């Protein structure tokens, strides 16, 4: 299978390896971000999914271009289907999650908190009587702390953010305005494709002049929850989970066979990996309304990325 498992190029400076992305900070203030095909879960890399990195990079590209009139973003260029060259930013220490529905499974999700009886959360009061997966009266921002040292994120209110000095009032106002406008655009364009953008997360940073800039990714299958519009009403009426892009085949398969946090991960069947790849590709095509074009140039994906980056950086 053609996969990009790593993209470590010693000739490029200031290398940083993330869970799924490899980064290089160039001396001129640009950052090279390479999305690999690694699949991360349970605090470890499980396997690689063919074309996953290309899908995520190109889905984010679609959304960055579709929202560039709302707020500035970090993108400078795309020298390869798996690569974005962006402006290096100082990332703000608050993760911005926008939610349009009472959904989620994590400890910080509003559905989890709501089912515990909480109504006041994230500086917002939700009404009684809401059901699982019900649309909220209006989209809300549920910020969490962004722990850079591996700690656990925690829910924040706007007052927390300001009192702790995580953001200034002007920054918080700007981030909030941008996030809600981006989400509204996302829901509108998703609806045209027969999708419901349920919730998503945004990451913002500041440039050398203090301007707030959208960074990382936007509205990808990994950063967002999408439901299929066709089938939502029936599922909601039945109290069942709305239909969605189910791309957690590998995660579920592993969890059924071992304690993934402590045991050795068993060998994952190729058929399962291919199935997951097909879901990612289908997600791209459904979200963007465009056909996915597999870039199979070069002897391997890493060779193609290296050649494209070398050619790009030699001229810019």
Image (spheres, helix red, strand yellow):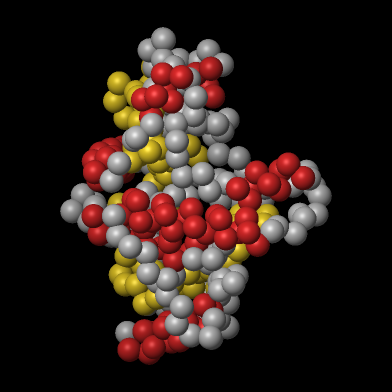
Residue under the image location 53 percent in, 17 percent down: 115
Residue occupying the far top of the picture: 128
Q: Residue at x 48, y 53 (%)?
A: 279
Q: Which of the image's four quarters has the C terminus?
A: bottom left
Residue 106, position as x, y percentages in the image: 56, 33
* Residue 307 seen from this side: yes
Is 53 above or below relative to 155? below
The x and y percentages for residue 78 are: 34, 72
Tell me the quarter of the image containing the N terminus. Answer: bottom right
20 horizontally vs 262: left or right:
left
The image shows residue 40, relative to residue 5, as above or below, that is above
**Looking at this view, is 38 or 144 the one in front?**
38
147 or 116: which is nearer to us? 116
Residue at left offset 40%, top offset 41%: 226
Q: Quadrant of residue 229?
A: top left
Viewer-closest of 223 and 206: 223
- Residue sitting at 29 percent across and 25 percent down? 138
Disc tally is 0
Q: Position of residue 220 (x, y in %)?
A: 41, 51
Residue 85 lies, with reference to residue 12, above or below; the image says above
Kindly tell me whether residue 165 is visible in this rendering. no
113 horizontally vs 31: left or right:
right
Toward the viewer: 305 or 22? 305
Does residue 212 appear to the left or right of 160 in the view shown?
A: left
Residue 125 x %, y %: 39, 17
């Amino acid at each position: 299978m053609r996969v990009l498992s790593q993209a470590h190029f010693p000739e490029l400076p200031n290398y940083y390896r993330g869970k799924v992305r490899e980064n290089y900070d160039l001396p001129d203030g640009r950052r090279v971000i390479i999305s690999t095909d690694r699949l991360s879960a349970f605090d470890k890399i499980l396997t690689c999914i063919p074309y996953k990195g290309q899908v995520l990079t190109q889905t984010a590209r679609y959304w960055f271009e579709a929202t560039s009139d709302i707020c500035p973003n970090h993108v400078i260029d795309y020298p390869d289907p798996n690569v974005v060259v962006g402006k290096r930013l100082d990332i703000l220490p608050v993760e911005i999650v926008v939610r349009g529905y009472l959904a989620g499974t994590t400890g910080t999700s509003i559905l989890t908190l709501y089912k515990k009886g909480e109504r006041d959360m994230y500086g917002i009061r939700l009404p009684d009587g809401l059901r699982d997966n019900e649309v909220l009266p209006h989209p809300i921002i549920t910020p969490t702390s962004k722990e850079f040292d591996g700690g656990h994120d925690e829910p924040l209110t706007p007052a927390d953010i300001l009192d702790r000095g995580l953001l200034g009032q002007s920054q918080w106002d700007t981030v909030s305005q941008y996030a809600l406008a981006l989400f509204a655009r996302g829901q509108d364009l998703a609806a045209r494709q027969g999708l419901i953008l349920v919730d998503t997360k945004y990451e913002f940073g500041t440039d050398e002049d203090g301007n707030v800039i959208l960074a990382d990714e936007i509205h990808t299958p990994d950063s967002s929850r999408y439901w299929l519009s066709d089938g939502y009403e029936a599922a909601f009426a039945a109290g069942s989970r709305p239909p969605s892009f189910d791309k957690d085949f590998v995660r579920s398969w592993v969890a059924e066979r071992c304690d993934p946090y402590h045991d050795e991960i068993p060998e994952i069947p190729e058929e399962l990996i291919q199935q997951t790849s097909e879901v990612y590709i289908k997600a791209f095509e459904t979200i963007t309304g465009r056909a996915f074009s597999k870039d199979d140039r070069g002897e391997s994906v890493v060779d193609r990325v290296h050649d494209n980056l070398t050619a790009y950086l030699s001229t810019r």
